[in-house]
Image: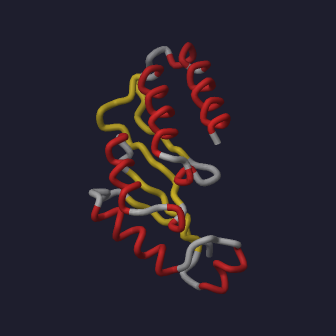
Amino acid sequence: MQTFVEAIVAEIGMYHSYSYREPIETIFLGGGTPSLLPADSLVKIFTALRQNFDILDNAEITLEANPGTIDQEKFFQYRKLGINRLSFGVQSFHQNELDFLGRIHNSEQAINAVTLARNAGFDNINIDLIF
């Protein structure tokens, strides 16, 4: 995981010259399960983003999260990093469908994840559902 994070940080640095210091309005950390990353890895990524790009104070910063990979403390850490929107990969509230999809969470964990996120101060939350 450390090698992966180092590669992301290096790539962020490579794109610095292409940004022309244009203000960044949105950041989306997704694809895979970024909520598996430890807090120190996210700190490295956000440090690189802030050093290389002009991120607006009111930018929407989203992190994709699997409900089976989070807890209350992670949500507080996300808020400290400036993440202000969460995208939960719930997919379904039917256990047989979650099992078929190989998801690591159940519907109770999905509901709990949204509750914990709200308790941590998130008011911009989406859930992905498969229909």
In the depicted structure, whether residue 74 falls above or below residue 2: below
The location of residue 15, given as percent across then percent down, is 59, 21
Asked which quadrant contains residue 50, the reply is top left
Q: Residue at x 52, y 39 (%)?
A: 41
The spot of residue 114 in percent (x, y) is: 39, 68
> Could you tell whether 124 is left or right of 110 in the image?
left
Q: Which colour style is shown?
A: secondary structure
| Residue at the spot 40% in from the left edge and 34% down from the top edge | 25
Please give the name of the residue rendered at 42% of the width and 68% of the height, measured from the top-left corner: 113
Q: Quadrant of the C terminus?
A: bottom right
Say which quadrant the N terminus sits in.
Answer: top right
Residues 57 and 10: in front is 10
**Residue drawn at (46%, 44%) of the image:** 39
Residue 130, how many percent across, how many down? 61, 72
Residue 31, how many percent across, how many down? 63, 50
Above-or-below relation of 92 to 113: below
In the figure, 24 relative to 42: above or below?
above
Q: Is residue 86 above or below residue 28?
A: below
Q: Total label count?
A: 0
